């Protein structure tokens, strides 16, 4: 059980092994300024869930998080917190030039990640601001409360979203006011409730 935020400082590196289970209290989550690698397997996924009512979220902020990777993970019951209002929140992980050039070596990758039972204000399962991301074969579900923020929110980001199942009130929203937003959306199953 995790009772307070796990903080990974800039220059730090968190590696999470397959089969790991994290149960967070309401005041706890992962706040990462360094690189994070959480790679499970189909047989031994990595699970992030509440120990009670809910927990904060997974937050990656800053360029030290570039090339982080999450695979075969389940993110369940996050309420938002730390710097974001979504289950998974990325901010300022790339410079404007990086986002515009879409440097794939620096991209943050999520494959076979399930984000479900999000209870955050704004109802976002996944948010990215000024980031370059790949979502591949992910399952993103928002809670039953409808809000225009949608299952995935992008602001000033470059995103490749492919082969994902997205259950939503609103699938995508993006803030483009003076921001560069690129979405490449390939073969996804979108289901509105």
Image: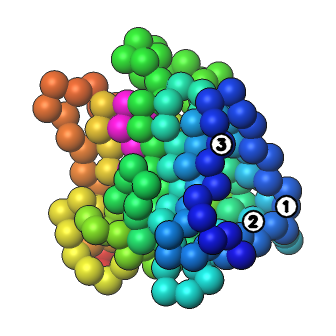
The kind of secondary structure element at disc 1 is loop
| Image: magenta residue range | 126-131
Quarter of the image with the N terminus is bottom right
Place residue 123 in its image quadrant: bottom left
Q: Seen from this angle, which residue lies furthest front?
A: 4
In the picture, the disc for residue 46 is: 2
Tell whether position 155 is magenta. no
In the picture, the disc for residue 155 is: none
Q: Identify the residue at horizontal 72%, vertical 60% (top origin).
A: 72
The secondary structure that most of the magenta stretch takes on is strand
Q: Nearer the viewer, residue 95 or 180?
A: 95
Q: Position of residue 171 (x, y in %)?
A: 31, 61
Along the polypeptide, which appears first: circle 2 or circle 3? 3
Along the polypeptide, which appears first: circle 1 or circle 2? 1
The kind of secondary structure element at disc 3 is strand
Separation of residues labelled 1 and 2 (CA atoms): 6 Å
Where is mark 3, residue-wise? 8
Where is mark 1, residue-wise? 18
């Amino acid at each position: 059980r995790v009772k307070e935020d796990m903080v990974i400082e800039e220059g730090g590196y968190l590696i999470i092994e397959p089969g790991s289970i994290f149960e967070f209290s309401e005041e706890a989550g992962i706040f990462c300024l360094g690189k994070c690698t959480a790679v499970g397997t189909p047989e031994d996924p990595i699970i992030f869930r509440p120990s009670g009512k809910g927990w904060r979220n997974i937050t990656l902020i800053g360029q030290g998080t570039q090339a982080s990777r999450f695979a075969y993970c389940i993110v369940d019951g996050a309420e938002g917190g730390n710097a974001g209002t979504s289950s998974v929140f990325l901010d300022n992980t790339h410079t404007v030039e990086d986002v515009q050039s879409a440097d794939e070596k620096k991209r943050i990758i999520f494959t076979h990640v399930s984000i479900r039972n999000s209870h955050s204000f704004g109802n976002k399962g996944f948010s990215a601001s000024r980031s370059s991301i790949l979502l591949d074969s992910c399952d993103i579900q928002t809670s039953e409360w409808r809000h225009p923020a949608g299952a995935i929110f992008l602001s000033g980001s470059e995103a490749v979203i492919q082969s994902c199942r997205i259950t939503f009130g609103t699938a995508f929203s993006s803030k483009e006011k003076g921001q560069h937003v690129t979405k490449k959306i390939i073969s996804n199953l979108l289901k509105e409730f």
